[in-house]
Image (cartoon, helix red, strand yellow):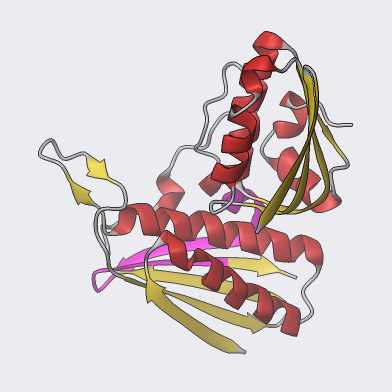
């Protein structure tokens, strides 16, 4: 189960995630991001209530980061210890901007 | 403690398999970090089996994911402060330990999308063994709690 709350303001958008970002829910996030991405210069993800992430979720973050490197910036906020561990193991903590 | 979960190797059964694992981990008082690592490992292995174990090949021998079907089982054993997860299927012989690790030091532009699943499993488990016996793929992951 994943809830996605999008707070959009012009060229800025915050994606507030709640629940699990896994094989079943990653397509939902991909769709939510791809729906707006062409008009965005500043994307943030709020992970305060994200309980779980697997490689399916990492795939969506990487492809979004690739796009945003060309047209603006992307930040991930409020990462839990458990999710951070996954970012560290996969080297994602070096390629993502985590605040 | 020993429990077995059996299902058809299909992505739609992943949530039930995860619930089976998480309930068991809760019963034995597993910590949040280890619980998440075990759930991620289950997902990565389960998804691979569901996509590829029973997949058919096209005329050139290329595997087409999600084309076949068959059974798989997941057995959980908790003893002496260790959790063992054993996956069994009767599909195409496949040893995930032979898969080459991705380079996790590459930049965003150089990184490829995908290929991280098995690597995450290798990094987070304490021991992984694979054998192909009596036409079965048997993969056992062990995590110390």
Examine the rendered structure and indicate whether residue A69 appears above or below residue A59.
above
Span shown in magenta: B120-141
Give the total of numbered labels: 0
* Residue at (18% x, 46% y) in the render: B57
**Percent x, y of residue B17:** 53, 71
Q: Nearer the viewer, residue A52 or A34?
A: A34
Q: Quadrant of residue B80?
A: bottom right
Q: Is residue B34 above or below residue B94?
A: below
Q: Which residue is farthest bottom? A: B1
Q: Nearer the viewer, residue B116 or A48?
A: A48
State the image coordinates of residue A1 (x, y, percent, origin top left): 65, 59
The quadrant in which the C terminus of chain B is found is: bottom right
Q: Is residue A71 above or below residue A53?
A: above
Judge whether residue B70 is colored magenta: no
Whether residue B124 is in magenta: the answer is yes
- Residue A97: in sight, yes or no? yes
Foreground residue, B35 or A64?
A: A64
Identify whether B117 is placed above or below A63.
below
Q: Say which residue appears at 74% left-offset and 79% top-offset.
A: B26
Whether residue B126 can be seen here: no
Residue A84, located in which quarter of the rendered image? top right
- In the image as oriented, which residue stretches furthest toward the left? B59
| Residue A3 point in image, percent of width and height | 71, 52
Residue depicted at 69% across the width and 14% down the height: A69
Image quadrant holding the N terminus of chain B, namely: bottom right
Q: Residue at x 59, y 77 (%)?
A: B20
Q: Position of residue B32 (x, y in %)?
A: 80, 65
């Amino acid at each position: 189960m994943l809830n996605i709350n999008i707070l959009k303001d012009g060229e800025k958008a915050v994606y507030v995630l709640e629940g699990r970002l896994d094989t079943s829910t990653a397509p939902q996030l991909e769709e939510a991001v791809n729906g707006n991405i062409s008009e965005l210069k500043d994307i943030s993800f709020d992970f305060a209530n994200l309980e779980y992430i697997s490689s399916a979720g990492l795939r969506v973050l990487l492809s979004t980061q690739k796009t945003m490197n060309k047209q603006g910036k992307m930040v991930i906020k409020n990462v839990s210890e458990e999710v951070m561990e996954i970012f560290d193991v996969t080297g994602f903590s070096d390629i993502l901007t985590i605040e | 403690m020993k429990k077995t979960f059996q299902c058809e190797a299909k992505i739609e059964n992943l949530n039930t398999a995860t619930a089976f694992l998480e309930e068991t981990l809760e019963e034995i008082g597993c910590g949040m970090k280890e619980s998440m690592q075990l759930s991620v490992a289950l997902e990565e292995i389960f998804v691979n089996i569901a996509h590829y174990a029973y997949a058919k090949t096209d005329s050139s021998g290329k595997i087409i994911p999600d084309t076949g079907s068959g059974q798989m089982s997941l057995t959980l054993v908790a003893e002496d402060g260790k959790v063992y997860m054993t996956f069994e299927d009767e599909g195409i012989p496949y040893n995930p330990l032979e898969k080459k690790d991705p380079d996790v030091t590459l930049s965003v532009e150089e990184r490829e999308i995908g290929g991280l699943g098995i690597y995450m499993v290798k990094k987070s488990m304490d021991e992984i063994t694979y054998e192909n016996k009596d036409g079965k793929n048997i993969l056992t992951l062990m995590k110390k709690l």
